Image: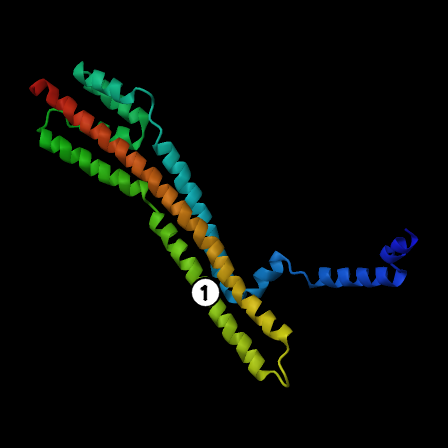
Amino acid sequence: MTSLFLQITTTPADTTSMLADGAETAESSVSLLDLAMAGGWAMIPLLLLSLAAVYIFFERYLTLKKAAKNPDGFSDRIKSMVLAGDINGARMLCAQTNTPVSRMLGKGVSRIGNPLKNIETSIENVGKIEISRLERNLAALATIAGAAPMLGFLGTVTGMIQAFIAIAQAEGSVSPQLLSAGIYQAMVTTATGLMIGLPAYVGYNYLVSKIDNIVHAMEYSSIEFIDLLQEPQL
């Protein structure tokens, strides 16, 4: 037991050496801010792209969340009012609801009395306008999803060129530390571009799926409304 205890006991000199090694490790660690600063000029446009992507996603998310909300029984109330001849009441209800579906049906209600083809055309035109509003800025988000990784790769290429120029101009033998430092600094922009592009791509597809759901609801409501106008003719 005594010999075992002596084997695992560290001397003061060993303790001092371990503390020194720990201090060197702490000093050699690199913070996120240091990495961002090491990325060079490409980090500035990448930062702007990331801010734009965050703004577009949350702005569109809140807009689509509001657009998808239709009061319970809204279509049934419109149908009852139209069948009862309360056109003004149906028009007022659509104006108060203020959603893509209500604005589309409101245009149809305001055209009651015109030929059915004209009513269908008016509803389709409003539907196109509403879809355009829903898709606003989505193209920019898709562009960011594709451009951020490419911009990061461009920053890496330019960083690697600068690193090899520095190595070529260095006198004497090139140390591995110099080579590895140049490479890791250049790779920072690629990693940053991917960290921006991947979430932007996922967010874009998520928003597109929400828009598809809203468009399906608009199409269903318009078909029901046109069928309603055809019922007295049956």
User: Is residue 211 placed above or below 223 in the rendered structure?
Assistant: below
Residue at left offset 28%, top offset 43% = 132
Residue name at image x 30 percent, y 34 percent: 214
Q: Identify residue type, mark 1.
A: Phe
Residue 93, by quadrant, is top left
For the point 16% across and 22% down, which residue is it?
228
Furthest-bottom residue in view?
172
Q: Residue 146's x, y, as percent?
A: 39, 57
**Residue 45 x/y as whole percent:** 47, 60
- Residue at the farthest top position: 84
Q: Residue at x 86, y 57 (%)?
A: 7
Q: From this viewpoint, is residue 48 visible? A: no
**Mark 1 — residue?**
153
Secondary structure of residue under mark 1 = helix
Q: Quadrant of the C terminus?
A: top left
Q: Is residue 80 left or right of residue 211?
A: left
Residue 77 as seen in the image, left or right of residue 21: left
Question: In this figure, which colouring scheme has been used for the structure?
Answer: rainbow
Q: Is residue 185 above or below residue 94?
A: below
Q: Is residue 170 left or right of residue 152?
A: right
Where is 142 relative to 121, above or below?
Answer: below
Q: x%, y% of residue 222? A: 20, 30
Q: Please provide percent x and percent y for residue 106.
A: 23, 27
